[in-house]
Image (cartoon, rainbow, N blue to C red):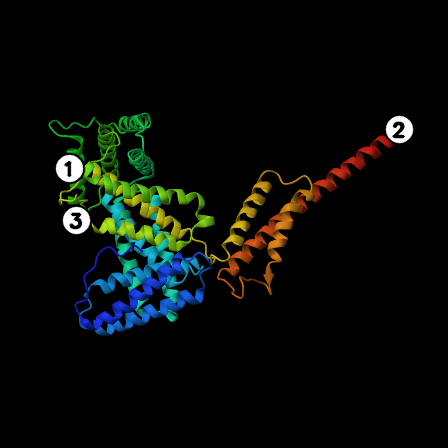
Amino acid sequence: MTDSPAYRFPLDAQEQPILDRILNIRDNLSLLKQDRSTHIKSQDVVQYYNEVMEQVDKLNAIRETKRDEQNRVDTVLDDCFQLISLFFLTIGRNSEAPAVYSAISTVKRLLDHLKEAGFYSQKDLESINQHIQQWRASVRRGKDTFSDSLLTLLDARIDVCVHILHELQNHLSRLDPEMMGTYEKLVSILRSLSACNTRSKFPSREVKEFEQQLLEIQEQLHESKITYEGKTAEQVYAERLGQMSLTEGEVSDGPTVVRALLARCLLWVEIIQEKNGKIDDRFQETYDKLLKIRNTLEQMNLTHAWSLRETDLYSYQRQLDRIDAARISGNFLDAEGRPADLHAQRTLLYLMRKSYAYVYQYIVSSEPVSEALLPIYNQLLTLKRCLVEVKRSGGVDSPRELYPYSMKLNSIDNMKKDGKFMVGNDIPEGQASVTALLAECFELAYELREESQSHEEEEAGGKVEGVNGVQVAG
């Protein structure tokens, strides 16, 4: 199992029994996560949650006069909360407070990296803001159900995320619609260039095309060519980042924001062309680790609805956390403690940010359905998409064409026992979501059948009218 990023041993001997107990809980959670022979049951997850909160209460009593204490107990507790949070998603209890823990931890990392990278889109911030509001509502709903200690912790972490989010929103606040369009295009180009920079074979032609787009934007903005006599593109890029940090807290006008981003794009395209997809050998190992994580998470994007168990994300979160925690003042350091050059720093940061973005995407797209019901839920999603596409394409010529859909829907409906979808003797979470989706599919099939029958009746009426017309004329 992947351990937490860093720790110190407890300073107080009273905390040792707590550490021993939560280590045992973490091991049990890890074993439960790895067991694919059976579905995760709600009662098991809730039991472990209660056991962890019992240890938290004991820890709070010990630390009543030293609230700022941080040691290995805290890092292992974080592991337990991360796992329990992902388990709550796995069993379909997405809207409950414990499920928020992992989401907020991931978003905090993502916001930090967006701020550090110094560029992001308005859509990034809107999505994060929308989900933060949903998570805060989940925390508030849990006030009569879950521990005050957990709810207070979640509220505090949400507040930190909101503060960073407002900083980032302020940075874009003076962009008018036209400038925002140019800015968003530059963000897209810069991200595409960073993706090109991590390809197995450097796509020179594609990078040249992006460079041409940047030159066209430069011309549209009537910007002069960047000059930096006696300096490298990396040095100038680093200076630009330094200037950004010096003005942190101030809100620049829209044109200044756009011009600064354009300059960074032009410098970055020059830097990656010079490097030709090669990273400093000192950071090849870290690069390979991050590239593997990014690629694996990216591939999961194609299949996660059918195969992803949310707890699978834990190992990726922890690998990323360890790499992130190893940085010093934001710098990636080699074995001798020397920082990476700007190209390596920005490349590694891109891979790390992109990986956290995938984890965030999978968490927020998690369906409020237990993994035990996911096979049925995913079949219904596929049926719904097919029926919607049939309707969009003009419907069916005959009700008989709907027989395969009707048979499948009826077979799923017949799986219910006393109105519930059962798995063994369990009633998994997500009954309302599956039942609602099944009802939508039946409604779509009914509408298509009615339309088809109406068309058949109209055609039959037209034929009769035509025959009668011939008879009258004769």
- Is the C-beta separation of discs 3 and 2 under 8 Å? no
Q: Residue at x 51, y 65 (%)?
A: 426
Rendering coords of residue 112 (x, y %): 25, 49
Residue highlighted by disc 1: 239
Mark earlier in primary sequence (1, 2):
1
Left or right of residue 95: residue 256 = left
Left or right of residue 280: residue 433 = right
Q: What SS does tag 2 mark?
A: loop
Rendering coords of residue 11 (x, y %): 16, 67
Left or right of residue 123: residue 398 = right
The amino acid type, in three-letter code, at marker 2 is Gly
Q: Which mark is residue 328?
A: 3
Q: Which mark is residue 92?
A: none
Q: Nearer the viewer, mark 1 or mark 2?
A: 1
Quadrant location, the C terminus: top right
Q: Residue at x 72, y 41 (%)?
A: 456
Q: CA distance from mark 3 to mark 1?
A: 20 Å
Rendering coords of residue 120 (x, y %): 29, 42
Mark earlier in primary sequence (3, 1):
1
Foreground residue among 13 and 367: 13
Q: Residue at x 20, y 63 (%)?
A: 71
Residue highlighted by disc 2: 474
Q: Quadrant of residue 376?
A: bottom right
Q: Quadrant of residue 84?
A: bottom left
Quadrant location, the N terminus: bottom left
The amino acid type, in three-letter code, at marker 1 is Glu
Q: Nearer the viewer, mark 3 or mark 1?
A: 3
Mark earlier in primary sequence (3, 2):
3
The residue lying furthest to the left in this view is 230
